[in-house]
Every structure is written in C-alpha cells, then in structure tokens.
Amino acid sequence: MACRLFVKPALGRGSMARRQSTAARLPLAGVRVLDMTRILAGPFCTMLLGDLGAEIIKIEHPQRGDDTRSWGPPFKPYERPTSSKFPGESAYYLGVNRNKQSIAIDIKQPQGRAIVEQLARKSDVLVENFVPGKLAEMHLGYEDLAKVNPRLVYASISGYGQTGPYASRPGYDVIIEAEAGLMHITGEEDGAPVKVGVAVTDLATGLYAHGAIMAALLARAHTGRGQHVDASLLHSQTALLANIASSYLVGGHEARRWGTRHASIAPYQVFATRDGSVCIGAGNNAQFARLCRCLGLPLADDPRFATNAARVANRQALVAAIEQRLAQESTRQVLELLEGCALPFAPVNNLEQTFAHPQVRARRVVREVEHPCVGKVKMVGPAVRYSDAPVGDRMEPPPMLGQHTEQVLRDVLGYSHEQIRQAVESGAAATFRY
C-alpha cells in the first residue's frame, strides 16, 4: 500500500490568498519562497517563513535530498513500503521542514538550472546557503536572477559572508562557535571550552535571515525592487556576544568562562541538591533577603553579603553556604521552599521534564501533524502567537523527497505532461510515487 500522500496542486498567489480566512489571514500569505537551502540555518529560516503563511518550494537533490534526511538515528519509520531509500524520515529533517513542498531538481543539469530560473521569475524570495560564488558560476546568483526578476529578495546564508578573505570557506556551527568567541566563554571556570548543546549559531543566523527577508519585503513595497540579503554565521555569532562584546570593545575586558555563574551578580547559578539541580538568581538585595529567609540561612545581615558588589567579592563563601544548605534537600523540597518567595528559580529539567512542564502543555508548545508515510509526528510549534492571525494552526507535514515535483512544474510553471516527462528523462527533475 502506498503512503497517503496529500496530493494537491502547488499554490499560486490567487489560490493561496483564497485559502486564507478573510478575517484572519496569515501574515505572509501570498508570498512565494524558493528554498535552496539544506541542513539547519537555511531550512530553519524558511520554516519560520512557512509558519507565517509563505508558500515554500524546497529544491532538493534528486538522489540524496537534504543532507539531514540521512542524519539518524532516530528515524520515524515508514508505516508501509515506500520507494524511499531512507530507513524512515529522520527526526533532524522533520524538525525544521514543515509547511514546505519538495521538488527534486538537479541544478548541475542545464534544464535543472532553467527550472530554477523559471521558478525565480515567479517567486518573491529565494534563500540559498551555497558557498559564496557557487550559484553565480551556474548563472543562478543574485545578479543573474535580479535581471529576470527585479522584485526578487535574494537571501544568502553562508559561513563568513559574501565578501572578505574567508568568504569562500564553508561554515559549520561548531567551527564558528569556536572562531567567534562563543566557545571561549562557555564551560566551567576551570574546564575546557565547550560548545552549546544545540546549534545555536545556525539557529540564530536563521532567525536573523528570516527577519531580514521580511524587512526586505517591506522595503520592496516602497521601492518596487528586491535586494540581496547577506547573512553569515560569523557575523550572527559575533553579534550574539552582546554585552560580552561591549565589555571588551568599551572597557578592554577579556571574557572568561563562568559555568552557570554570572560575572556581575551573586548568587546567580545552578546549585546541586540531594538528587538533582536547581537554578537560583538573586539580582538585588530584596531578592537575596527573601532567598535567605526561605532557606533559613542567616546571611542577609552578614556585612560580607550586604550588597551585590559585596556578594560578588565574597562569592566563594556565599556559594559554599548555599550549596551546603541545598545538599540536604531533594530538588522537590527546594522548589517547595522557594515557591512564593518572589525570586527567580527553576529546576534543571531534562527533555522529558521539559515537555511535561505544565506551562509547556498549557501553551500547546508541542503540536502533532499527520505525515502521509510515517503517521503522527510530534514537533515544537511556532514560538510566537499572534492575536489576529492563526499562526501554528496551519501545520503541514515535512514533505517526502520530490513529493511535489510534478505539481509544481505543472501548476506553477505550466509544464505539460510531455514537458515533465522530458525533464525527468533528462535527469533534470525526478518524480516519485510513494
């Protein structure tokens, strides 16, 4: 039995607009995005645009598709036999590719490149994350496509940006974390540099790019012209250094690792309990006094801890006293002691505890979609809610490789059955029967 594919024509501007409720349209309804990205930063960016209602046409290699299709385990196994060469849909791929259509195009083939150009003519946005210059070699760079569609917003996501001595280098999250200062400030005080537990540099670059694309679309409404958006991992990560960067640039202060501690506030860190850990912050004198009262610690009147500056200067003694107190209690007991004390605190949760959190459940952070080949798939939904737009209510499953090739060629580009057959036979495109 084949998969229960959601066979529908690719949406044109008119049909997409009609699909939206007149009372509550999605913010980017009617915007078509040509997605030539793979892995994380780019697909995350285009997924965010898709969540907001943009039509995303994801171009994938006909044989291997997005690299992350093979990044597993874990894989969500197929519920019935398919023509896919993968053992299932990878969790990595599923996590950043909802609300997209997939077409399988080989851009190394002349006709494949022609298809991309034809789609670019009919698109509002193109997002790519090739090494700078690679698409220009194929006559698919910004200057090339701006000639055929001057209104096109062409967004490039790269490791180091489109110019400069490192422009031609490929970019990887962990490498940029090391190169742009993040790894230097992450880890325990007396430990080695470590990377952040999620690819935060990739994700931040995707966030920067998605905001820049929307700004470019707003600018186009005034000028009538698109433009080239140049987003890079290196620049994004350097910008994320925020106050740490400012301390160095303004005061010449070299940064260091603090573990979970804060350089300028004490106590403000993770403490071990008898069976786990809690994070506690006391950012002012009143909060510190409440912390001492709730824990039964006679520290509030100690001159060593009378002010935040004094607490920072005497951090070692302060932390030792709190650690000794909390080591006597379970995490649950500590949370009960701190409840209602009007200061920030939280347990250090694993993922099971995170997704069982009552606030996570109440806010419907986790959504579920029905995938045609692997069944029900849980995923984290859009992070932002809108009062007048149903963002998050429109959740289409991540597509199978090339699931929409035929529909897009037919309904967006107007290809006949014979033209589609010729594109497939030439190797420029691939269609699949799942």
Image (spheres, rainbow, N blue to C red):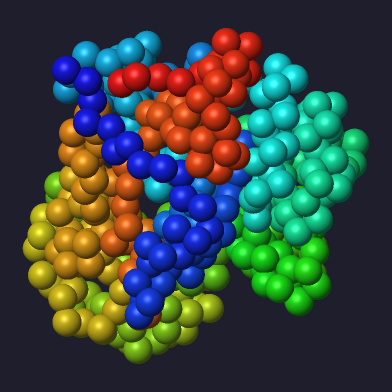
x then y, percent, for residue 246: 72, 67
> Would you say 208 lies left or right of 9 here?
right
x then y, percent, for residue 272: 25, 52
Identified at 45% across, 58% down, the residue is 15
Quick check: 204 above or below 134? Answer: below
Q: Nearer the viewer, residue 72 or 192?
A: 72
- Dividing the picture into quadrants, the one containing residue 327 is bottom left
Q: Say if residue 299 shows up in the picture.
A: no
Q: Quadrant of the C terminus?
A: top left
Quick check: 285 above or below 75? Answer: below
Q: Say if residue 364 shows up in the picture.
A: yes
Identified at 51% across, 14% down, the residue is 63
Identified at 24% across, 46% down, the residue is 369
Quick check: 205 above or below 211? Answer: above
> Would you say 112 lies left or right of 354 here?
right
x then y, percent, for residue 7: 32, 37
Count of numbered circles in the view: 0
> Would you say 215 lies left or right of 186 here?
right
Q: Quadrant of the N terminus?
A: top left
x then y, percent, for residue 267: 39, 69
Identified at 23% across, 25% down, the residue is 3
